[in-house]
Amino acid sequence: MSEQENKECRKCDILQLAKSSLYYTTCLCLLLIIICNLSIIVKSILFHGSPPSLFGRSMLVNMSSNIIGIEKGDLLFFEYEEPENLKADDVVALMNGDSIFLGRISVSKEEGTERVLASTDKVTEEKNDYLVTASNLVGTYKRGISKIGNFIMWSQSTTGIVVLVVIPLIYSFIHEKNIKKKHETYMKLLNKDDN
């Protein structure tokens, strides 16, 4: 093998290593996303009636803009607290039948008893105060990631699945085929050089 061919082979090897590293890093990231999604799906099936949680935190995508400071499409993280530990102006997630809504805490004292209520910041025609109890409290808002909820919802659509799963799988097959082909060519060059 000539010096020029040897340099070309080394360039090819470095480029191939970079492509392979990118490919395997992408596969690892997708695998982690799939594991988290499967965990959430299994938990939501096993514990029907409560939102799925991962590592002790409930994650919800905000689908409305009824709380000031929390935008539609944000991914929100909640941790459970006892209703008596809630403070005024805490943002909480509450179960209302099969749906979940966000509310801001207000404390009212009626007839000597203290009641913890949650209501939306958006004024509606109907009364929107809900009594917060241990059975309907999902958790207290801790932090959110802006607009990542939109990506999560898109990734669960048909287009998202095609882009995030099908296309990488097709690329994987093509990538592996190219690696084998280049390896065979490289081995033929080595064998030719040995003879």
Image (cartoon, rainbow, N blue to C red):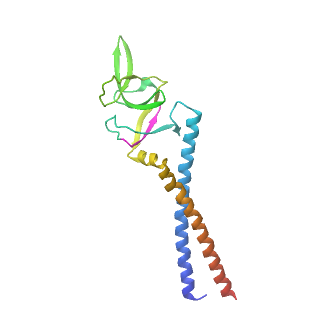
What residue is drawn where x is 40% and y is 39%?
63
Percent across and percent down for residue 167 are 52, 59
Examine the structure image and report whether residue 19 is included in the region drawn in magenta: no
User: Outermost residue, front direction?
Assistant: 158
Count of all numbered marks drawn on residues in the image: 0
In this rendering, the answer to whether 121 lies above or below 171 is above
Percent across and percent down for residue 154 are 45, 48
What residue is drawn where x is 68% and y is 84%?
191
Highlighted magenta segment, given as a residue range = 72-80
The image quadrant that residue 72 belongs to is top left
Report whether 128 appears left or right of 53. Answer: left
Report whether 77 appears left or right of 121. Answer: right
Examine the structure image and report whether residue 74 is included in the region drawn in magenta: yes
- Closer to us: 14 or 180: 180
Percent across and percent down for residue 153 are 45, 45
User: Outermost residue, right direction?
Assistant: 195
What residue is drawn where x is 52% and y is 64%?
22
Residue 81 visible in image: no
Report whether 24 appears left or right of 123. Answer: right
Q: Quadrant of the N terminus?
A: bottom right
The image quadrant that residue 102 belongs to is top left
Q: Quadrant of the C terminus?
A: bottom right
- Closer to us: 153 or 140: 153
In this rendering, the answer to whether 14 lies above or below 155 is below
- Closer to us: 147 or 194: 147
Residue 88 visible in image: yes
In this rendering, the answer to whether 191 lies above or below 31 is below
Percent across and percent down for residue 155 are 48, 49
